[in-house]
């Protein structure tokens, strides 16, 4: 798979979002505004209204059964870089996928816990304040 990774810098946090949802887009915008990082969103379909956004690079996966392969390929392409791949599921289906495959995903990604997901989705910092 051909992913666009030339913009990723050494030492950078790379948000990897799973599933198209309002939470995914809000999370990507919030991370871009606060930290200046572009999120990578893996999903089966890309809604037309979301295609022209500055804070997300979409990676369309034609079938959900290929998601693990796509995530492994993405991590392998960045394996030589000094980066942190932070995996955030943004839909119920993607959350279930992550929990079912957590052991394998944690070899390559820092996986958001359920509490971290809620904080990221809702825009709360560790102290419980709005960003």
Image: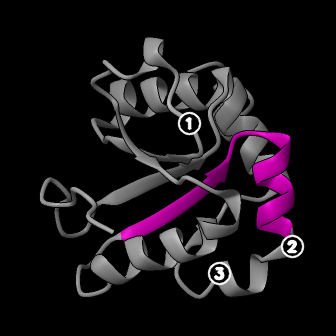
The image shows residue 116 at horizontal and vertical percentages of 73, 49
Provide the residue designation for mark 2: 100
Is residue 119 placed above or below 17 in the rendered structure?
A: above
Residue depicted at 28% across the width and 60% down the height: 3
Classify 10 Å Cα crowding around label 2: few (below 14), some (14-19), many (20 and above). few
Provide the residue designation for mark 3: 106
Asked whether 82 falls inside the magenta stretch, the response is no
Q: Residue 122 carries which label?
A: none
**Whole-number angstrom distance, CA of label 2 to CA of label 3:** 12 Å
* Callout in the foreground (2, 1): 1
Asked whether 87 falls inside the magenta stretch, the response is yes
Magenta stretch bounds: 84-99
Q: Quadrant of the N terminus?
A: bottom left
**Whole-number angstrom distance, CA of label 2 to CA of label 1:** 22 Å
Earlier in the chain: of badge 2 and badge 3, it is 2
- Would you identify the image quadrant in which residue 49 lies? top left
- Would you identify the image quadrant in which residue 81 lies? bottom left
The image shows residue 13 at horizontal and vertical percentages of 37, 58
- Depth order, front residue of 112/24: 24
Residue depicted at 52% across the width and 54% down the height: 61
Residue depicted at 16% across the width and 61% down the height: 9
Asked if the residue under mark 3 is in contact with the one under mark 1, i.e. CB atoms within 8 Å, the reply is: no
Is residue 29 placed above or below 100 in the rendered structure?
A: above
Classify 10 Å Cα crowding around label 3: few (below 14), some (14-19), many (20 and above). some
Provide the residue designation for mark 1: 45
Earlier in the chain: of badge 2 and badge 1, it is 1
């Amino acid at each position: 798979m051909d992913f666009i990774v030339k913009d990723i810098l050494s030492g950078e946090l790379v948000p990897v979002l799973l599933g198209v949802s309002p939470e995914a887009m809000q999370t990507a915008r919030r991370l871009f505004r606060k930290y200046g990082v572009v999120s990578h969103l893996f999903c089966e379909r890309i809604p037309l209204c979301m295609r022209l956004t500055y804070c997300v690079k979409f990676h369309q996966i034609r079938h959900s059964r290929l998601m693990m392969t796509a995530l492994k390929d993405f991590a392998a392409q960045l394996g030589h870089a000094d980066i942190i791949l932070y995996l955030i599921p943004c839909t119920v289906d993607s959350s279930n996928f992550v929990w079912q495959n957590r052991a394998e995903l944690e070899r390559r990604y820092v996986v958001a816990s359920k509490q971290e997901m809620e904080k990221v989705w809702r825009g709360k910092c560790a102290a419980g304040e709005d960003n």
